[in-house]
Image (cartoon, rainbow, N blue to C red):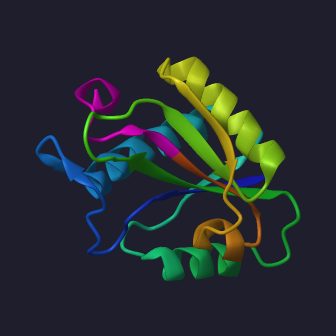
Amino acid sequence: MRIYIAAGHGGNDPGACANNTTERDVVQKLVSEAVAYLQNLLKDKAEIIRVPDDLNVNNTAEWINQQDVGKTDSYCMEVHLNANQGVPGTGTETFYGNKEFATKIQQKLIEVLGLRDRGVKDGTDLKFNRVTNPASCLVELGFINNPSDLE
């Protein structure tokens, strides 16, 4: 089994900005730590592959698809932070390309992060989910403009 993990807003795109940081910087750090942890935890069960940070959404999907040619047991996720106007939102939500995969990821994120469960939502209109070949999901870990979620 292969699992590709990408930090959203690669390349020069900072993503959402709040609390003196950018979405890109936060998710790149989180993805780096998560990949290292999962590589050790799942070393005999899955190959955990970090998607390079310098790719934008078009290049990310293309890179994953090129790496995954001929594979049948692969998954991919892109990690983001949410943001909103007004009173900061809170919670974690997962947008699916593959609903079963997204549901498993969302359940684990809620268990580990302890944030409000904003649910699993249809994300088939999102480019990452639409164009990657492996089963996919896009996660919004929390709100960058909410200091509690960001922590």
How many marks the image carries: the answer is 0
Q: Residue furthest front?
A: 86
User: In which quadrant of the rendered view does residue 55 lie?
Assistant: bottom left
Which of these two is toward me, 5 or 113?
113
Q: Is residue 106 above or below residue 77?
A: above
Identify the residue at image location x=77%, y=45%: 101
Identify the residue at image location x=29%, y=46%: 26
Could you tell me residue 38's position as x and y percent?
58, 37
Could you tell me residue 37's position as x and y percent?
51, 34
Is 90 magenta? The answer is no
Q: Is residue 51 above or below residue 130?
A: above
Magenta stretch: give its range.
140-151
Residue 42 in sight from this viewpoint: no
Could you tell me residue 124's position as x and y percent?
71, 65
Q: Residue furthest left?
A: 20
Which of these two is toward me, 54 or 115?
115
Identify the residue at image location x=36%, y=39%: 143
Quadrant for the C terminus in the image? top left
Identify the residue at image location x=27%, y=34%: 87
